Image: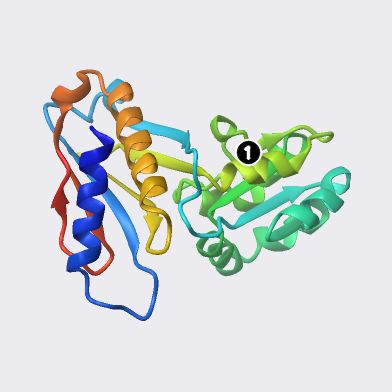
Amino acid sequence: MKKEEVLKIIKELKEKSSKRNFNQSYDLIITLGKLDLKKPDNQLDFFQTLHFSRGKDVRVCALVDTELKAQAEENCKTTILADDFPKYAKDKKTVKKLASEHDYFIAQATVMPKVAQAFGRVLGPRGKMPNPKAGCVVPPNANLKPLVDKLQKTVRIMAKTSLMVQAVVGIEGMKDEEVADNIINIYDSVLHHLPGGKSNVKHALLKLTMGKPVKLE
């Protein structure tokens, strides 16, 4: 995928888009083919760290003990201490609200069993349990700021039941070059994780929230 062609498509989308009273998102859609997702080895589930943020604040919830309390309160949108876990275990509605309001959950490794007990039944099915692959399970002496900064530029790529990958790669108002870099970064990473590489890709499309998809490749 050539950057010049991606920039041309971004420009085309902007020119054709009607003026909205909000910043639309750029959505990258990759449709897959010749891939049997019933085989676990063919499924995609990985985290990709981009060079640029995607234009929206990534909301992080910290599930920690007292060792990380101060850092979590300084760097995360929400902090929940282990002593308060039991009340969440009894309140599924509140945990659902937490899940909808946060993009990532990080947890102190020493309280992970308690996290699973209190939050697992809601966060698990939504794919939001603290994930070691994203660095979201941390020791009690961790430095949280670099992790939270990294999560601002991290996107989870999944294709487990549907032959399609869809990810927000930026918003209107961002520099075209940054959006293009995010697109190419994600596209190349998807190719790298596919068993047949480019032969497993049918189409790559880009669209604005309220617009029609345009073929990238």
Horizontal and vertical percent position of residue 54: 46, 52
Q: Which residue is drawn at 47% across and 38% down?
A: 50
The amino acid type of the residue labelled 1 equals: Cys
Count of marks placed on residues: 1
User: Quick one: SS at disc 1?
Assistant: loop
Residue 63 visible at all: yes
Q: In this picture, is 38 found above or below 115?
A: above
The x and y percentages for residue 22 are 39, 76
Residue at image location 33% in from the left, 24% down from the top: 193
In the rendered image, which quarter is residue 60 located in?
Answer: bottom right
Count residues near mark 1 (Cα–Cα under 10 Å), then give few for <14, some for 14-19, many for 20+.
many
Q: In this view, does 55 lie to the left or right of 111?
A: left
Q: Is residue 179 above or below residue 185?
A: below
Front position in the image: 83 or 186: 186
The quarter of the picture where the N terminus appears is top left
Q: Mark 1 points at which residue?
A: 136
Asked which quadrant contains residue 83, the reply is: bottom right
Quadrant (top left/top right/bottom left/bottom right) for the C terminus: top left
34 relative position to 138: left or right:
left
Q: What color scheme is it?
A: rainbow
Among all residues in the image, which is located at the extreme bottom? 21
Residue drawn at x 41%, y 54% as measured from the top left:
175
> Is 109 above or below relative to 215?
above
Question: In front: 184, or 120?
Answer: 184
**Is 100 or 154 nearer to us in this picture?**
154
Q: What percent of the width, then of the height, locates residue 98? A: 59, 63
Does residue 162 appear anywhere in the picture? no
- Does 145 sit left or right of 202 as displayed? right
| Image x and y of residue 172, in percent | 37, 63
